[in-house]
Amino acid sequence: MRLRKRANWPILVYRYWVDPEYQTWEQFPDAIRQEAEAMRALWNHLVGAFERRQVAYAQARTALTPEVTEARPTTSLTAGTTHKPSALTLRQIQQTFLSATQEVSKTSPVTWGNKQFVTTQFFAALARFFNKQGNPPQPRSGEFHELHFQHRFTEGGLPVERIFGHSQRLCLTNVPPDAFSPALPQRQRKHLARTSGFFQVSGSQVRFRTILHRPFPPGAYLKTAALVGKKCAQNGYHCDRTDEGHTTPARWNWSLQLTLEVPPSQLPLPHDTATAAVQVRCELVDEQRLCFGILTDATGREEALFLPEPILGSWQHKRTLQRQADHLLDRTKLQLQKLPLPVQLPLSVKQMLSHLNTAHAPGLWRLLRSLDHMGVEDEVVQILRHWAADSTKLLREAHGLERRYLGHRDWFYHNVAVQLCHRYQQLAITATELYSPAVQEKKENNTGERQGLGTYRQLAAPSRFVSFVQQAASKTGTTVTIAPRLRPVAPR
């Protein structure tokens, strides 16, 4: 592996959501779609080489030497499976496998940057498999659900300033400096940060629009640039004013991911004698405050760590939207049960209509698809269409709200972890599952509150905060020790 020119510079990934000029994957140029097919073929050929390697290894394990056969004439073939091949045999099998992967990569028509990405991902999957952290890599087929096109910049990387109008593989239109001025309102900064550019894939340019919501660090170097797309299945429904409805098609989310080598920051180092302990917990103090930890330093000073109120408010609003969707489902089922059962429907559809009292949302979706497929137009279909359209609006708002407040929570945890690691040289973390007396009383008196408290723990996600502390400590040199999890017994 080639050594980095700036080994002490941290590496950060900047991600920007982009809106490409092509709305669907089928609209992309043929050269780009052929590149994606070639990348998948390269992956499948690498998987095939690994499967042949596994077969050769299994044959070497089951092959008994003459000495073993003479020493154990009654040994069955099953016992031979425990025979370990010699080191020379293992080296030969591994060398054959590596030679096969090199030949597959050499003959592949994939461009160099994408070829490096596929092979890196393949050997990373092998490392997880041999470390018993995942399954072996599997061949890929069918429709594309995720795409990753990459450029790698050698010779130490590309100066980040050259992205603006000087690079042929990735180009962005420059934005005014006021786009990142804290003196301007956020809406005005967002308007000024709007820009456009293109990303080159296999000789074709994909033009896009984006918002540079954060500036590039001055003096940074661009190591890799990737255009990443993920297909999001839209289990939704749209009903227009004429009561004609149709399912919403799947859409693609695209992002531009830039891996940068940034100059080391000049933040103050933590004090050598500064120590503190953090008791990670999930304690609902009141309707506006959710405590996720208690900080105690060497002087005995205690400080409660709370989630920001907007995060808790967004979580409560999302719960309200879910309850509205559940109420809408129950009301729709009652409306359908009051209608007479149509005679001309197939038996399978009649059975679904006769079991509405135990049906959930997926059952109503299947019923609506069956009726739309048969071309049925009656009151049942109209009720289902209105339910599907209204439910889609509620659930999409809930999912979008969840995505935003979880991102806000992670951003907040990251900043708190960085501040703690710059204030203290040693941090001791203990995890517990304690609640305030008021919440504990609710838990004992109302069994339905148990599920709500579990959801609060999902919102707080103490393990996420601990992971951010560990990441920040690896950059600042802070020593972090994690005590075993405490599970106190609730008072009876």
Image (cartoon, rainbow, N blue to C red):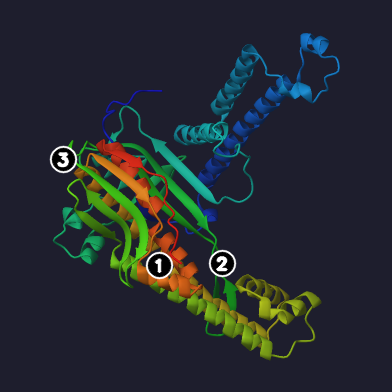
Label 1 or label 2, whichever lies nearer to me, is 1
Q: Give the x, y percent position of residue 298.
A: 20, 45
Q: Are marks 2 and 3 in contact (CB under 8 Å)?
A: no
Q: Which mark is residue 268?
A: 3
Q: CA distance from mark 3 to mark 1?
A: 36 Å
Residue furthest to the right in view is 74
Amino acid at dot 2: Asn
Question: Which residue is found at the position 55% from the left and 54% from the top?
Answer: 26
Q: Is residue 172 above or below residue 437?
A: above
Q: Residues within 10 Å of mark 2 (few under 14, many from 20)?
A: some
Q: Residues within 10 Å of mark 3 (few under 14, many from 20)?
A: few
Which of disc 1 and disc 3 is earlier in sequence?
Answer: 3
Q: Give the x, y percent position of residue 21.
A: 42, 56
Q: Are marks 1 and 2 in contact (CB under 8 Å)?
A: no
Q: Which mark is residue 40?
A: none
| Foreground of the two, 29 or 456 | 456
- When asked about the image quadrant of residue 11, the answer is top left
Q: Is residue 377 left or right of residue 421?
A: right
Which of disc 2 and disc 1 is earlier in sequence?
Answer: 2
Q: Which residue is mark 2?
A: 235
Q: Residues within 10 Å of mark 1 (few under 14, many from 20)?
A: some
Q: CA distance from mark 2 to mark 3?
A: 50 Å
Amino acid at dot 1: Leu
